[in-house]
Amino acid sequence: MFYGQKLRNFWQTVRASVLTFLNMNFWSVLSIVLALFALAMGQNCPAKFDYDSDKKLCTAERPVHGSCPEGSLYDVNFNKCVYVLRN
């Protein structure tokens, strides 16, 4: 009888450890997936803007007689409209 009780306690301990590991592993994987999703969504520029990899900005050409697209400001240093509503 003593051996059976010891074996039952052992399997209960193993089961608890496995469930804890799987639970932690699930939350770790979920956190990584959500972080990658947020990173991918953050790299998109709105319509009318192009991503300038050198400057790491969303930019648009400024019309000669006009204003920049909505959500952007003209930057003299770049001679382009720079999207400013980003982060």
Image: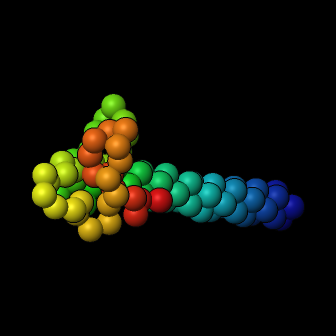
Using the image, determine if residue 80 lies above or below residue 2. Answer: above
Q: Quadrant of the N terminus?
A: bottom right
Is residue 40 shown above or below 70?
A: above
Total count of labels = 0
x, y percent for residue 9: 78, 62
Which of 21/45 is in front? 45
Please identify the quarter of the rendering in which residue 77 is found. Answer: top left
Camera sees residue 40: no
Residue sitting nearer the eye, 81 or 2:
81
Q: Can residue 45 be seen in this view?
A: yes
Residue 39 image point, x, y percent: 41, 51
Residue at x 69%, y 56% (from the top left corner): 17
Q: In this view, does 42 lie to the left or right of 68?
A: right
Residue 24's spot in the image, x, y percent? 62, 58
Q: Residue reaching furthest front?
A: 65
* 19 displayed left or right of 37: right
The image's colour scheme reads: rainbow
Q: Furthest-top residue in view?
A: 54
Q: Farthest bottom residue?
A: 70
Looking at the image, which residue is at 21% across and 62% down? 67
Q: In this view, does 28 lie to the left or right of 86?
A: right
Please report the residue visible at 13 percent of the width from the left and 52 percent of the height from the top: 64
Of the pair 21 and 61, the residue shown nearer to us: 61
Residue at horizontal 18 percent and vertical 48 percent from the top: 61
Residue 85 location, quadrant: bottom left
Picture coordinates of residue 12 (x, y %)?
72, 63
